Image: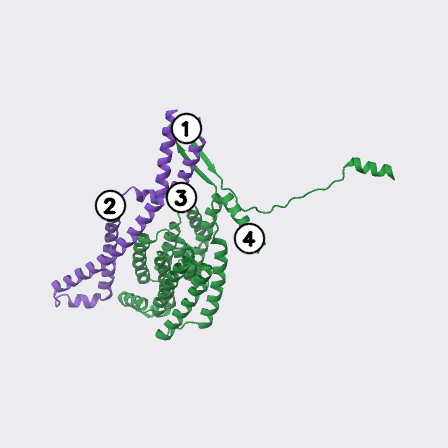
Chain colours: A green, B purple
Amino acid sequence: MTDLLVFREQLKKFYSKYELYLTPVFKFLLALVTLVMINSSIGYMSELKKTTVVLVLALMCSVLPMNFIVVVATAVTLGHLYKFSLECALVMLVLFLLLFILYFRFASNDTIAVLLTPLCFILKIPYIIPIAMGLVGTPASAVSVASGIIVYYTVNYMIGSASVLSTFEEDGALEKFRFVIDGMLDNKTMFMTIAAFVGTMIVVYLIRRLKVDYAWTIAIVTGALLDVLVLLFGDLMYNTKLSILGLIVGSVVSVLLAKILEFFVFNVDYSRTEYVQFEDDEYYYYVKAVPKNTVAVPQKRVKTIRVPEKAVREQKRDR
Amino acid sequence: MLNEERVRLMTRMACYEAKEGRKNVAIGNYFRGDYIGLQVIKSVISATIAYILIFAMFILYDFEVFMADIYKMDLLDFAKSVIIYYLIFTVGYAVISYGVYTYRYTRARKSLKTYYNNLKKLSYLYERETKR
């Protein structure tokens, strides 16, 4: 345990030292992973799949604000869908607009939640999302998580029904359009997942704010159990074809991941070196404020023990 | 001469202004009613856009039926129901955003309290300096 704590301290120190460079790197990686995931799951437009295009977009994301990643991901998704089917792209465009209106009104600094929700679905660990967002977010994050779920399920449905869509006649645009909308509104799994995730998130948030011992652990376990219960209940009610084994294994993995997250986030202040500028009547101040490290990290010290030469000489003489 | 105490205070305040304080300071410039009113108006506008989008999709979905029925149906009645749904939708959205933004305003004010105290302290330090 001590080793872990020391590791955390070192991580903190490292982050506060190189924060200026690490943040763009993280943004770049997040954008890159998002784009690669989108391309691998719905890569219909070959121009967008070129390595140079992906890299340039990711590089742009690394220096621009976080929400730019969401905009780029949206644009790329729409591009692929346009190549796939014009009707799907139109439905998706309207859906994105509606979600953006909601998202930017209520939860505009929740980029991570919006991006990670579909990513975690693709990686088969979606159950971590409500728990993690309940732990580190606010109830407004529910909007972002729900948006992520809607986008994932809708795109998934469109791609899944590619063979059905291709059977429609050339001039059957309206039928195609109707088919997509029907499928979207009839997607019980999606609505069940939204209900389960939003409920879990709010419960986790409420419990972790309680003033009791182990509030975070209680919140994680209760959240995971509630999530499993609601999803199983939904499966019974609407026959959502849920993989029960996947649900249980996924939830256990999510609890473990949430515990790791708790260790790195709970009670840790990743305060960093600040560069601020201000002025008064006489001076301009360019201040670099470095946070003090309160917990000492043991440093390796090499100590050479030497016998003084004089003593060695005296010893030789005595012999 | 540099006044170390003042520099320290100013640095701390500049840090706050640059990080979590940035939004709060912007909110703090408004009166309560002005801020919430502005946000509710923005919400009403976005709700209107959202409603138009949903309505367009609704028409497009049943386009053929709609076109066939357009001469048969009572357009006044149709318009009335469209407006009633619009009002329900927009008012609901506005009420939710009223709640959310009232909460945000109160929270920002609370967070700004220390900042304003520091401002007072700073002006006191200035006064003391000029007296000397």
Badge 2 and badge 1 both on one subunit: no
Residue indicated by mark 3: B19
Helix, strand or loop for disc 2: helix
Mark found first going from the N terminus, 4 or 1: 4
Q: Amino acid at mark 2?
A: Asp
- Chain identity of mark 1: A
Q: Amino acid at mark 3?
A: Lys
Badge 4 and badge 1 both on one subunit: yes
**What is the spatial separation of the Cα atoms under label 1 and label 3, in whole angstroms?**
23 Å
Residue indicated by mark 1: A283
Quarter holding the N terminus of chain A?
A: bottom right
- Residue B126 position, x and y percent, is 37, 30
Rendered view: A201 above or below B23: below
Helix, strand or loop for disc 1: loop
- Chain identity of mark 4: A
Q: Quadrant of residue B130?
A: top left
- Residue A86 position, x and y percent, is 32, 61
- Chain identity of mark 2: B
